[in-house]
Amino acid sequence: MKLPPRFDMTITRADFRRLLPAAVNHVPHAEVDGAFVHRDGERGWRIGVKQLPQLRLGLIRLERHQVDFSFTGYTAGEIEDFMARFEMYFRRGGG
């Protein structure tokens, strides 16, 4: 599955923080104004994480976030590889 640059995730912010280091290959990053940011010279990425209203399924309430990605200085192939790794680490439901 190829992830779009913006999508909704049903995940807690704590779980997102916990899973992110492995998903980004443990590169150093910081949380700045609700986003996770990595810079390496002229290259960098930003993962914005914005809380959305809860998903309600009967009595079940699930935390949701809109996640959007932006990249600077990466080739299309590098971005595709990054997104594939991210998707693999956050995959749920038997993936």
Image (cartoon, rainbow, N blue to C red):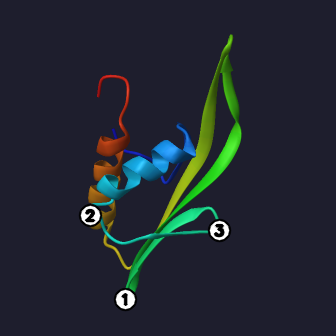
- Residue wearing tag 2: 77
Amino acid residing under circle 2: Gly
Q: Is residue 75 above or below residue 35?
A: below
Camera-nearest residue between 28 and 75: 28
Residue drawn at x 41%, y 49% is 18
Is 95 drawn above or below residue 50 in the view shown? above
Q: Nearer the viewer, residue 54 or 74?
A: 54
Residue that badge 3 annotates: 33
For this rendering, which residue is in front, 79 or 48? 48
Kind of residue at disc 3: Asp
Q: Amino acid at mark 1?
A: Gly
Image coords of residue 58 (percent x, y): 68, 10
What secondary structure is found at the residue carrying circle 3?
Answer: loop
Q: Position of residue 3 (x, y in %)?
A: 41, 46
**Count of marks, rendered view:** 3
> What number is the disc on residue 41?
1
